[in-house]
Image (spheres, grey):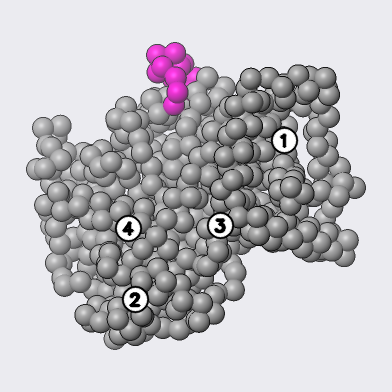
Amino acid sequence: SSSSCSSGMASLTLLSALLASSAPVSRHVVRTLPIRMSASSSSAGVSLPSLDPAIVARLLVSPEATRLGRELVALGLQQNPQIVLRRSLDLAQALNTVSIEVFTGGLQPNSPPVILRRLCEELGATYVKLGQFVASSPTLFPPEYVAEFQKCLDSTPPMPWREVRLQIESELGRPLDRVFSSVSHTPLAAASIAQVHAATLRTGEDVVIKVQKRGVQDSLRADLDLLYGVVRIWQLIGLATAELTDVVGTLRDAIFEETDFTKEAQRTVQFRQFLERSPQLAGSVTVPKVYPQASSRRVLTLERLYGVSLADLEVVRQYVPEPELALIVALNTWVLSVLTNEWFHADVHAGNLLVLRDGRVAFIDFGIVGVLPQKTATAMLDFVRAFPEGDSVGIASALAGMGFVKEDEVDIQAFSRDLREVLQSLDDVTTKGSSAGAINETQLNQLVASVGKVAAGYGIRFPREFVLLIKQVLYFDRFTRLLAPNLDVINDERIAMNQRPSSTASDAKLMPHNGSAQQGGGAPTTTDDEEVRSDVDNVAHIEVELLP
């Protein structure tokens, strides 16, 4: 249909500009074809590639095209025609809004990254998520796009309370007052996919309710299936490689998972079980309790924890006399999860690690997780040991162990020499952060991209999990500089990875010898998912400030 075509062209235009750049980091997913950037083009400054019609015609009647046709028909039959039509109208409105900004001087016509970032914001949830994926994947996308998409805003007006109530009651199959004794009509935070409300269960527990916005799942499916279909057609005609299809498929699957709140609930429960299997962490680390009787695919009810960011040193001191103990607990828990759990928390920024009033450390927001093979996990430990010491040879050896290459095929000495300049840049990233512990994400991504670029020169290619893993190490390095600048990460025996090899996951002394967080009764939590985390961080901080 014309609606499907226009939405598909939007996807094609966006991906052309994002991925068909001359930047070397993206050439492994997009073939070199004459894609021209033109300020006068009506499609965000991008001209689509010219292909040989005879070659395209031959490809379109091939057996592979027949198989692809069946796949795309199956996807099309899953679509709601009304949703596709509405998204086409949204596209027209978004193009009109961004065009006006260009013509009135609000945007520079010769800046495709800025124009595409604004177009993504106007198109809503799917394309905001696409932008965030670009921003978090510096080894896949050109640096100018990674930097610009750091600014991609995920802020939309909240659903009216009437719609929130209808959504909750529809999902739970019961009147609101049969489950909750009270629910705040004003959300704590709102974003493109969901919003969060404070509430109290009829049994008396303080909770937060994450409510998915009505209709967002159908819109996401329409957008993502069209996006995937466009890339599959690109692959058929030779414009893109299978790797690009894999990237888009990964993004598609991740966003589909994110709209199924049962996945986040399962991860939260599973991490709690992981903590219970680790008695050395008892009473010192926690996660929000899930209330399944008040949850569904589009509604998630969690225990409310009041806490402060691990990086907020002054307030942390009010709860833990020695802040470095809280840091060690958090680091040991994370390392143990990398080595022994099915997956690890892959977004341990300051807002997702809290110190509670009773001194416990809380991990929240399991929207992003990573899975590593044992070889990579072992190399990660080597990296964590070498990194604080500035041991470029050790870092080079660990990175070679994390990548898709045999370590004995890499000249470690030469690789380490080339890494030294990158490591010096890291000092600027970590020492110029704010007092609240924030890391400049643009600089951090540039750093990770630089590491990837140097590694590529030695035949090392990293999976996306590499970015997730390295970012977590950098976050913990930042926390160490803030909370425990004199901590000897390499030799301090309170840190699990420094204990004797004979120690096992069940008997390792993961808690500091000279103190630990108190075991307290469940302080309530402020928790939230990935897309609304920044606003919830602010809410959590404000609530702590108001506590007596």
Q: Which residue is mark 2?
A: 174
Q: Residue at x 53, y 38 (%)?
A: 249
- Compare marks 3 and 4 and give the one earlier in the sequence: 3
Q: Which residue is mark 1?
A: 21
Q: Which residue is mark 3?
A: 218
Answer yes or no: do the residues labelled 1 and 4 have beta carbons within 8 Å?
Answer: no
User: Badge 1 local density, few (<14 within 10 Å), some, or many (20+)?
Assistant: many
Q: Quadrant of residue 258?
A: bottom left
Q: Give how far apart the Cα atoms at labels 4 and 2 are.
A: 20 Å
Q: Which mark is residue 265?
A: 4
**Frontmost residue, 184 versus 539:** 184
Provide residue 384's location: percent of width, then percent of height: 34, 38
Answer above or below: position of 525 versus 108: below
Amino acid type, label 3: Asp
Q: Residue at x 48, y 50 (%)?
A: 256
Q: Which residues are magenta?
A: 403-415
- Compare marks 3 and 2 and give the one earlier in the sequence: 2
Q: Residue at x 57, y 54 (%)?
A: 220
Q: Nearer the viewer, mark 3 or mark 4?
A: 3
